[in-house]
Image (cartoon, rainbow, N blue to C red):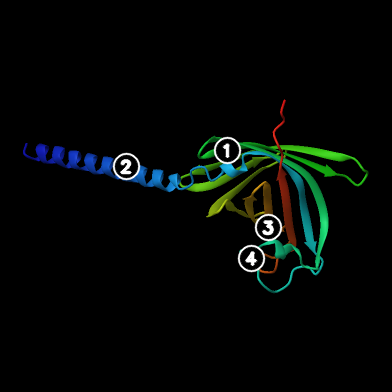
């Protein structure tokens, strides 16, 4: 019968350690998330502009593959040719300091002069101390992981192998401008070579209606 008190003591000790461990984990998780408090808020509001897609006319080449250091000069190369322009409207609203919901309206002009309007739902949020973006389009759901760089700058990226979809882009909010610069690898592109597709957007923040 002496073994019973020992067993109870062990169980109590394990229970206390388990609670302490859970408490530490919860505290660490809360602290890791706290640093992201309101980092999405600069995107709140209505933005409007053009999303431009460029193609490198020289094709993919040996060189810096999947570059991380990109800026406006990256899309000023003479070999880049404008492939398509999408008129876009982004509307975002922070629900909490860690969650933002929005709507994206893309207007794509067709060759016959008509246009297709695509409406997507977006959710930006922090989960387990990490940034996430989920865009639900009419025909697919796109998920990006994010990293906050400070100074209202966020990097978003995703990497799928089948079919190939590798994307990396930087978003920044400066005054009333919401700027996107990035690249993508799709289909038969070789991820070990330079990007074939680049994209750039400069959206302007629209003033709220007085009505």
- Work out how far the residue at label 1 is from the one at label 4, CA to CA, in angstroms: 28 Å
- Work out how far the residue at label 2 is from the one at label 4, CA to CA, in angstroms: 39 Å
Q: Report the residue that reaches farthest toward the front.
A: 210
Q: Secondary structure at mark 3?
A: strand
Instruction: From the viewer's perspective, tell me whether residue 166 is left or right of residue 108.
Output: left
- Along the line of sight, the residue nearer the viewer: 3 or 50: 50
Numbered tag placed on residue 67 in the rendering: 4
- Work out how far the residue at label 4 is from the one at label 3, CA to CA, in angstroms: 9 Å
Eye-nearest disc, 1 or 4:
1
Sequence-earlier tag: 1 or 4: 4
- Along the line of sight, the residue nearer the viewer: 36 or 80: 36
Residue 163, placed above or below residue 34: below
Q: Secondary structure at mark 1?
A: strand
Read off the residue under disc 3: 182
Eye-nearest disc, 2 or 3:
3
Q: Are marks 1 and 4 in contact (CB under 8 Å)?
A: no
- Along the line of sight, the residue nearer the viewer: 90 or 128: 90
Eye-nearest disc, 2 or 4:
4
Read off the residue under disc 1: 100
- Work out how far the residue at label 2 is from the one at label 3, CA to CA, in angstroms: 40 Å
Pinpoint residue 169: horizontal percent, then vertical percent.
65, 55
Count of picture labels? 4
Say which quarter of the image contains residue 157.
bottom right
Residue 169, placed above or below residue 34: below
């Amino acid at each position: 019968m002496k073994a019973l008190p020992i067993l109870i003591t062990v169980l109590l000790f394990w229970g206390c350690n388990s609670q302490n461990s859970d408490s530490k984990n919860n505290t660490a998780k809360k602290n890791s998330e706290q640093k992201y408090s309101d980092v999405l808020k600069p995107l709140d509001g209505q933005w409007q502009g053009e999303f431009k897609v460029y193609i490198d006319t020289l094709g993919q080449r040996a060189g810096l593959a999947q570059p991380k250091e990109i800026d406006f000069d990256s899309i000023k190369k003479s070999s880049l040719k404008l492939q398509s322009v999408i008129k876009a409207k982004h509307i975002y609203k922070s629900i909490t300091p860690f969650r933002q919901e929005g709507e994206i309206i893309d207007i794509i002009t067709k060759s016959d002069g008509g246009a297709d309007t695509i409406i997507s739902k977006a959710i930006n949020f922090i989960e387990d101390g990490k940034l996430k973006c989920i865009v639900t389009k009419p025909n697919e759901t796109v998920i990006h992981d994010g990293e906050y760089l400070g100074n209202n700058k966020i990097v978003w990226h995703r990497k799928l192998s089948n079919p190939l979809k590798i994307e990396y882009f930087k978003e920044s909010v400066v005054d009333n401008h919401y700027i996107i610069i990035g690249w993508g690898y799709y289909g038969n592109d070789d991820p070990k070579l330079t990007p074939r597709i680049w994209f750039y957007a400069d959206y302007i923040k629209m003033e709220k209606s007085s009505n």
